[in-house]
Image: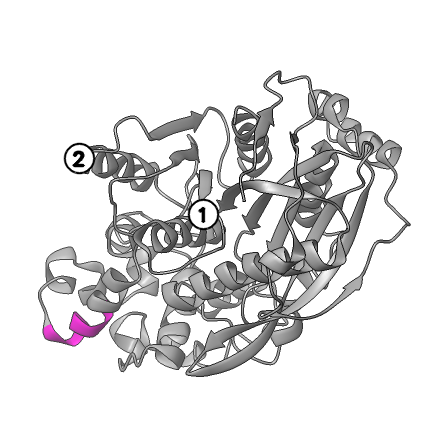
C-alpha cells in the first residue's frame, strides 16, 4: 500500500500528519493484544483542562500548542518472559480528532525507574510524570506508556530491573499491541511515524529498544524516525566505576536493585557482602517488595549505618576499580553488567542524548562517551547531544521531555 505523508512543519501547528489513504485493520491482525479498557477520568479529558494544567506547570508554550482533548486506555498484552508468555500492561493516550483526515504519529515513552506498583502508568495515570507525558497527546500524537514487567497487570512478578532483553521485549510487544488496538478499535487514525523517548531507566530501555529494532532483532511493525534519551545508565560498568569514586552516593538502591534483579533472572551467584558491607548485604535480599518507593529504599539502606558514604557502605574490594575489574569473585557480575549495557552502532535514525549538567545521580560522562562512540561508529549526522544547564537528575525530567517533543515536531 502506498501512503503519502504531508508534514506540518511549523512549530506552531498541531503535531500531526495527514495521509490520503487509511491503513486497513487487516494489515494488523490481533496477536499481542489481550484486552483493553478506557480509564479516562472524564469523557474525554477536555483540551481546556489540559491547557490549564500546562499553564500551571509554567509551560505556556506547550499550553498554546495543546489542541486536542484526549482519551486514556489501559491495554493488557502478551510478551515473552522466562520462557513463556506473560500478560503485561500499558497506558495509551489518544487525541480526539478534530478533522476527518487527522492522522497522528505515535510516541512510545519509557518512564523513569519506579519501585512501587502504585506509581506505574496504568495504576496511577494522575501521578505527576504520568500525567505530564500522557497529556502530550493533546499536541496531536498518540502516547504509549508501558508499565514494564512487574507493574500493572504483571504486578505479582518482580520487576527485572536493568535486564535488557526483558525490557526490550515488553516495549516492542506493547508497540505492536497498541497498533492492533488502534487499528481495530479506531479511537483515532495513525500514520507510520514512530518515535521513542525515555528518561533514566526509560532512557536505557529506549536506546536498547532502538538497537533491537535497527539490528533486526525485533520488529515493531514500523521503523523509528527519531529517539530521545535522557540521563540513562547506558554503560553499567562505567557507572559503577564512577559511583565508587564519589565521596557519597544517595541512590544506593540502584546497585541493590541490580543485584536482586540479576540474581532472580540472570543467574547471578554472588555473596552480596562482596558488594556491600555485611550489615547492608544482609538487608538487601527481599527488600524490593514493590510497595516501597525509591526514596523509602534509599532511606532504609542509609538507616542501617546512618551514612551514605561510599567507604562505609560498600566492600573495599568492590570500591577498588582494579580489583573489581580483575578479581574472579566479580567476574560474573562484571559480565552481566557488560551484557546488559547498550552498545553503539551506525544509526539508521536520529538520536538525541539529553542530560542535566548538575546531575549527581547519573554521570554526564555516560551520555558524552556514548555520543563519542556513536560518532566513531559512523553515526556522525544521526546522533546529537544536548546538555540542560542548571538542572539535576530530578529537575531535568520536564525540560528534557519538552525539548524532545519540540525536536520530534521537526519530522
For label 1, the SS is: helix
358 relative position to 46: left or right: left
Q: Is residue 350 above or below residue 72?
A: above
Q: CA distance from mark 1 to mark 2?
A: 21 Å
Name the mark on residue 80.
none
- Residues marked 1 and 2 touching at CB (< 8 Å): no
Q: Quadrant of the N terminus?
A: top right
Which residue bears the numbered disc 1? 203
Q: Which residues are magenta?
A: 328-333
**Image spot of residue 49 (x, y percent):** 87, 36
Locate residue 27, reporting x and y percent. 58, 57
Q: Quadrant of residue 227?
A: top left
Q: Relative to residue 62, is residue 355 drawn left or right? A: left
- Place residue 229 in its image quadrant: top left
Closer to the camera in the image, 96 or 404: 96
Q: Nearer the viewer, residue 33 or 371?
A: 33
Q: Position of residue 301 (x, y in %)?
A: 47, 67
Q: Is 84 on the left-hand or right-hand side of 130?
A: left
**Colour scheme shown:** one colour
Q: Is residue 329 magenta?
A: yes
Amino acid at each position: 500500500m502506498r501512503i503519502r505523508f504531508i508534514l506540518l512543519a511549523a512549530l506552531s501547528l498541531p503535531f500531526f500528519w495527514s495521509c490520503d489513504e487509511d491503513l486497513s485493520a487487516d494489515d494488523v491482525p490481533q496477536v499481542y493484544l489481550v484486552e483493553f479498557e478506557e480509564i479516562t477520568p472524564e469523557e474525554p479529558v477536555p483540551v481546556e483542562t489540559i491547557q490549564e494544567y500546562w499553564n500551571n506547570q509554567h509551560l505556556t508554550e506547550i499550553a498554546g500548542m495543546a489542541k486536542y482533548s484526549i482519551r486514556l486506555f489501559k491495554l493488557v498484552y502478551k510478551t515473552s518472559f522466562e520462557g513463556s508468555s506473560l500478560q503485561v500492561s500499558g497506558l495509551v493516550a489518544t487525541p480526539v480528532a478534530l478533522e476527518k483526515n487527522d492522522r497522528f504519529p505515535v510516541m512510545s515513552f519509557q518512564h523513569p525507574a519506579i519501585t512501587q506498583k502504585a506509581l506505574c502508568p496504568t495504576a496511577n495515570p494522575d501521578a505527576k510524570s504520568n500525567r505530564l507525558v500522557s497529556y502530550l497527546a493533546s499536541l496531536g500524537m498518540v502516547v504509549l506508556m508501558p508499565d514494564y514487567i512487574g507493574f500493572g497487570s504483571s504486578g505479582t512478578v518482580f520487576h527485572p530491573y536493568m535486564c535488557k532483553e526483558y525490557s526490550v521485549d515488553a516495549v516492542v510487544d506493547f508497540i505492536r499491541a497498541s497498533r492492533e488496538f488502534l487499528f481495530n478499535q479506531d479511537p483515532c487514525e495513525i500514520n507510520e511515524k514512530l518515535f521513542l523517548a525515555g528518561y533514566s531507566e526509560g532512557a536505557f530501555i529506549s536506546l536498547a529498544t532502538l538497537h533491537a529494532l535497527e539490528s533486526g532483532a525485533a520488529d515493531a511493525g514500523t521503523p523509528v524516525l527519531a529517539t530521545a534519551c535522557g540521563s540513562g545508565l547506558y554503560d553499567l560498568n562505567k557507572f559503577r566505576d564512577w559511583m565508587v569514586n564519589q565521596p557519597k552516593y544517595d541512590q544506593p538502591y540502584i546497585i541493590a536493585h541490580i543485584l536482586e534483579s540479576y540474581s532472580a533472572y540472570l543467574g547471578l551467584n554472588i555473596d552480596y557482602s562482596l558488594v556491600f558491607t555485611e550489615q547492608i548485604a544482609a538487608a538487601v535480599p527481599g527488600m524490593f517488595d514493590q510497595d516501597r518507593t525509591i526514596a523509602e529504599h534509599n532511606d532504609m539502606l542509609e538507616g542501617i549505618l546512618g551514612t551514605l558514604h561510599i567507604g562505609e557502605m560498600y566492600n573495599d574490594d568492590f570500591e577498588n576499580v582494579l580489583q573489581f575489574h580483575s578479581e574472579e569473585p566479580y567476574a560474573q557480575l562484571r559480565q552481566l553488567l557488560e551484557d546488559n549495557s547498550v552498545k553503539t552502532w551506525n544509526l539508521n535514525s536520529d538520536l538525541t542524548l539529553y542530560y542535566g549538567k548538575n546531575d549527581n545521580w547519573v554521570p554526564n560522562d555516560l551520555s558524552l562517551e556514548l555520543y563519542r562512540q556513536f560518532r566513531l561508529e559512523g553515526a556522525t549526522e544521526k546522533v546529537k547531544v544536548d546538555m540542560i544547564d542548571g538542572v539535576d537528575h530530578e529537575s531535568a525530567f520536564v525540560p528534557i521531555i519538552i525539548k524532545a517533543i519540540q525536536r520530534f515536531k521537526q519530522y
